[in-house]
Image (spheres, grey):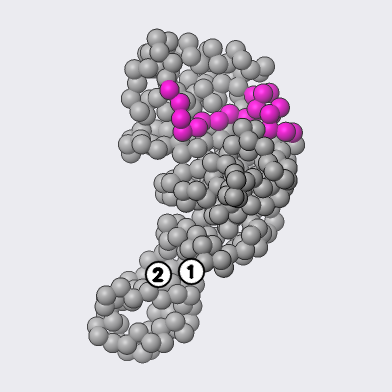
Amino acid sequence: MTNEQASSIPAADRAGRAGTAVAFTTVTKSFGEVRAVDGIDLRIDRGETVALLGRNGAGKSTTINLLLGLDTPDSGRVRLFEDVPERAVGAGRVGAMLQDGRPVPRVTIRELVDFVTRTYPKPLPVDEALELAGLTDLAHRRADRLSGGQAQRVRFAVALAGNPELIILDEPTAALDVEAREAFWDSMRGYARRGNTVLFSTHYLEEADEHADRIVVVDSGRIVADGTAEELKRAAGGTTVSFDLAGGPSEGLATLPGVTSVEIRGDRAHLRSADSDATVLALAAQGAVRGLQVAPVSLNDAFLALTRASAQGTAQSTAQDAVPLETNR
């Protein structure tokens, strides 16, 4: 969490959030010759909402399984609230909503959530879980007769049943339409506003951009970036300056002030720039610029740049050194 974000939270709430929710210490996990997790060091403070991003096979699912105690690390240590994952999960301090899950036939949503709450020592009241998940009006509907979005909200209510302080979501809005996705995130924001911790993985990068306090990018089992969405965008070259070459030369564009990379698509140049004002002024000094456009780098652009760098072996192997973002975590 950035200092600016922290300052927007009342002091009493920040004090109640003090401490670490998730801690990975030099964790590794291999499956045969495949190193799925390769020396991850990660800390998530209480009250943060963190997005875990990565390409298919990057190590996200293995990381989540280690967090939940479904796998054990080959080396290193995983702690949730300074305890081993199995005890934290068993105590109801951690809830999870995974991709797979089939509805239980012939039971209502209320009956299902009520049953699950009875397995925890200090559960969330059933009505409260239903309200947080946006299911109050559907409580008496059968759990196996729901739309995709409604079924996903039931999984969310089940994950809330133990009254967790941390909830882990693996692709929570996969296959949902736009309306269902928005309804789900409305529910999630209600949970997070209570000071709880959220860790979610997603392939919808706009969700990470909009909902996460902080984004962790993994590739080849390593953390290659860790920071806010804006920090990741700036690290990737915060602005794209594009213009028509109009038959002119492209040599020398990479040496313009602020330019971090150059891509030529047809007869149009796309310059990634860390200082778009300086880049545009330098272009103007060289003569007329046709079709000039200046646009901020998207999180998708930043993600692609970071993972391409990792694939080429230029990224570092730890969150602190991977990208010069925040160093105070």
Whether the magenta-drawn stretch holds residue 279 is answered as no
Where residue 167 sits, quadrant-wise, is: top right
88 left or right, relative to 157: right
Residue sitting at the far left:
246
Give the x, y percent position of residue 284. 36, 85
How far is mark 2 from mark 1, CA to CA?
8 Å
Q: Does residue 233 appear anywhere in the picture?
A: no
198 left or right, relative to 184: right
Q: Amino acid at mark 2?
A: Thr
Give the x, y percent position of residue 233. 49, 61
Residue sitting at the far bottom:
286
Question: Pointer 2: what residue?
Answer: 240
Whether the magenta-drawn stretch holds residue 101 is answered as yes
- Does dot 1 land on a helix, a strand or a loop? loop
Q: Is residue 276 above or below residue 19?
A: below
- Give yes or no for contact between labels 2 and 1 (Cβ–Cβ under 8 Å): yes
Pick the front one: 101 or 163: 101
121 left or right, relative to 228: right
Give the residues in magenta: 83-102
Residue sitting at the far right:
82
Residue under the image location 51 percent in, 31 percent down: 97
Q: Amino acid at mark 1?
A: Gly
Q: Is residue 27 above or below residue 115?
A: below
Residue under the image location 46 percent in, 84 percent down: 255
Question: Pointer 1: what residue?
Answer: 237
Give the x, y percent position of residue 219. 54, 54
How would you rate the neighbour count of disc 1 (Cα within 10 Å): few for under 14, some for 14-19, many for 20 or more? many
